[in-house]
Amino acid sequence: MKFLPLVIANLGRHKLRTILTITSVALALFLFASLRTVGTTLDAGSQASSAQRIITQNSTAFVIPLPMSYANRLASVPHVTEVTWANWFGGKYGDGKKFFAQFAVDPASYLKMYPEFLIPEEQKQAFLKERSAAIVGEGLIRAFGWKVGQNVTMQGTIFPGDWTFTIRGIYRPTLKEYGDDSFMFHYDYLYEKYPDRVTPGWYIMKIDDPNVAPQVAKTIDDQFRNSSAPTKTGTEKAFAAGFASMWGNVKLLMSTIGMAVVFAILLVSANAMMMNQRERTAEVAVMKTVGFSDRRIFGLVITEAATIALTGAILGLGAAILLPTVTGFGDGGFLPGFHVTTGTALVGGVVAVVLAIASGIFPAWQAARLPVVQALRRVE
Amino acid sequence: MKIPLIYNIRSVIQRPVSTTLTALGIGLVVAVFVAMLALANGFVAALVKTGSPDNVLLLRRGADSELSSGIPRDAISIISALPHIAIGADGRPLLSPETYMVINLRRPGFDEFAVANVVARGVSDKAFEVRRNIKVVEGRRFASGQSEICVGSKLKGRFANVNVGNVLRFSNRDWKVVCRFTADGSSFESEIWGENEQFQNVFRQTAFQDVAFRLKDAGGFEEAKRALLADQRLQVDAHRESEFYASQSQLLGNILRFLAIMITSIMAVGAVFGAVNTMFAAVSSRTSEIAVLLTLGFHPRSVLASFLVESAVIAFIGGVIGCILALPINGVVTSTTNWASFSEIAFAFRVTPGLLLAGIVFSVVMGIVGGFFPARRASRLPVVQALR
């Protein structure tokens, strides 16, 4: 530790180079963490979902609705304790540039099914009482500046017409992963306008024991196999994972790019470290002459590399963690709940350590085994 | 007087390790740049090519995708009487009322919930004439009234039971695959085609989703559109088919491009720093050399130019490496969900000569930017001191 001032002095001899190298390491880790977060955010849906909820949808296509009569039949399936349903609305608000999901839900049973949505009790009651009422996530409030009591009009793309809703409540998710950018309104409001077209898009059931989910799913699907609307039933988790898989190779792409970034920066910083050492050949020779052991020289060079890599890592990962909160990037839009997970931060830390070792080890080794006599000849 | 280029090239060769590392760093940035733009290009190209400018696509008024559209059966006869529609060899209008559905197809090798939403398009027998880019490459067209389907060529290898002769089961029915078609790399190649009347039945639809027809006169779009909108019996929007599919690619295309630019510009900063480091080291290790050049009478401006060129040469090598790294990705088929239409679309990375050129230019710019300050330092060296 007493050599720390020496390491710092060495870093300060070429301030510009040190700053540039630290900045590039910081940029690399920022990018790495952000790209990895895209992947974890896509997966978050399935990790955050409850194992006690199962979903039934049309097995042919998820856009084909299921008959209303299934509600009672599903409720009578053993182990099913609660049933609710929802519909995709597909409305356009304003210029339609900012996308958010709208669901027509059976109000009371839906909110009971999802205790993850925290709503003040009086807002909840106001929502339940009024047919044209809506409950929206905090993220949408931030994005559009809506207020409770405000009327919001949307154009229906699937169900034509102008639809006016009154915002009666704001929900906050218990976990970021659930997302706070959904818009929910009464199923009946949709139904009364299109009675011949509207039936539930999918059903959500609560089961009393997560372990029986596969049997319950099979019972349900067998029951409807030969009906006009055969079903596919599975846990919420399985559906969320299936939904994430629709992105196809995006995750692979992101991680490949992440690796390319790390590798590119490794080259840059290894290069900088090597140049540093090459310039200091004479200096190292002098240090050895005055009694620095090979081991100590090795340690000094590695410490220098580590200081650069770790400072860069702290800056880069810190920025990646803070950025979504500061800019509100995670609000609404494509990746709701975008935030750097602890896992990603840890992986970033490991990358920094590897970077420190990989960029420092070769110059350190070179410095340690520097032949003193030869090197000293270059000292003026 | 200018310092000859060979001086720079020799100097570059003098320091093989740091030159290689810097060039590789820049090369990786260029490779990512080219690859990401190739992805965005491929995606946009697939959708832009899907439509034809002399075809018209009718959707229900206000619908922004084929999935959310609906056109009732009685409207079809009104539309088909329109004088603006081209007439086929058999005297019938080139018009295809279509049902459009995205069906769940399982991804082989994953569990049953990892599904892709594949477009099942029910078309009329005229669809193959309306869409000129469709070419049946294997088998024959499906026959009317039979449980037969045609599959786009990009489905092959990505899903089970999609080869000619296979039986594909969906919507509680077995369908015989009787043909495979290509469509110039457009998104039709990611679709399953069958007869509209049958698809309408099995998907329990009461209406068609859209109507596609060929214009009699390629320039007559505006006129046809006016006629359609003026008809009080119809509730439709007329889109030029090419424009409609291009607009479907806008959202994801923009996201991909935005990502490409953002990621590569952050990476580029790192690579430029690498170049700055390398060039500073080059300048400081050649202090006396530069002093000699200045003493010999080379203008400081020539020294500046020379070091800029040297940096550009290193970056150029990097750019070439990057392009070579990115080249194998050309033609690789990947797929993602186009959220604008909620359907899975397969497309190939497209590395174009223009893109490669852009990559090289990008690398040289990085080199020049990174080389500027070191080069300026070189040109301003105090000669007397440096000569010692």
Image (cartoon, coloured by chain):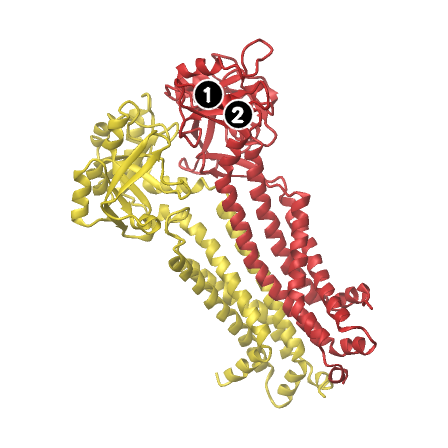
Q: Earlier in the sequence, mark 1 or mark 2?
A: 2
Q: Which residue is rendered at x = 67% and y = 48% of the image?
A: B356
Image quarter hosting the C terminus of chain A: bottom right
Between A214 and B190, the one nearer to me in the picture: B190
Tell me the SS state at disc 1: helix
- Between the C-alphas of marks 1 and 2, the distance is 10 Å
Where A236 sits versus B241, above or below?
Answer: below
Tell me, yes or no, if residue B333 can be seen here: no
Q: Is residue B229 left or right of residue B272?
A: left
Find residue A234 and report its horizontal and vertical position in percent.
Answer: 33, 36
The chain letter of the yellow chain reads: A
Q: Is residue A36 left or right of residue B51?
A: left
Residue B339 occupies quadrant:
top left
Residue under numbered circle 1: B228
At label 1, which amino acid type do we have? Answer: Leu
Where B293 sits versus A153, above or below?
Answer: below
At label 2, which amino acid type do we have? Answer: Glu
Find residue B256 and report its horizontal and vertical position in percent.
Answer: 52, 46
Both on one chain, marks 1 and 2? yes
Q: Residues within 10 Å of mark 1 (few under 14, many from 20)?
A: many
Residue under numbered circle 2: B222
Q: Which mark is residue B362?
A: none
Find residue B319 and report its horizontal and vertical position in percent.
Answer: 68, 55
Please name the color used to draw chain B. red
Between B138 and A339, the one nearer to me in the picture: A339
Q: Chain of mark 2?
A: B
Q: Is residue B23 left or right of residue B74?
A: right
Between B62 and B259, the one nearer to me in the picture: B62
Q: Residues within 10 Å of mark 2 (few under 14, many from 20)?
A: few
Q: Which residue is rendered at x = 45% and y = 51% of the image?
A: A38
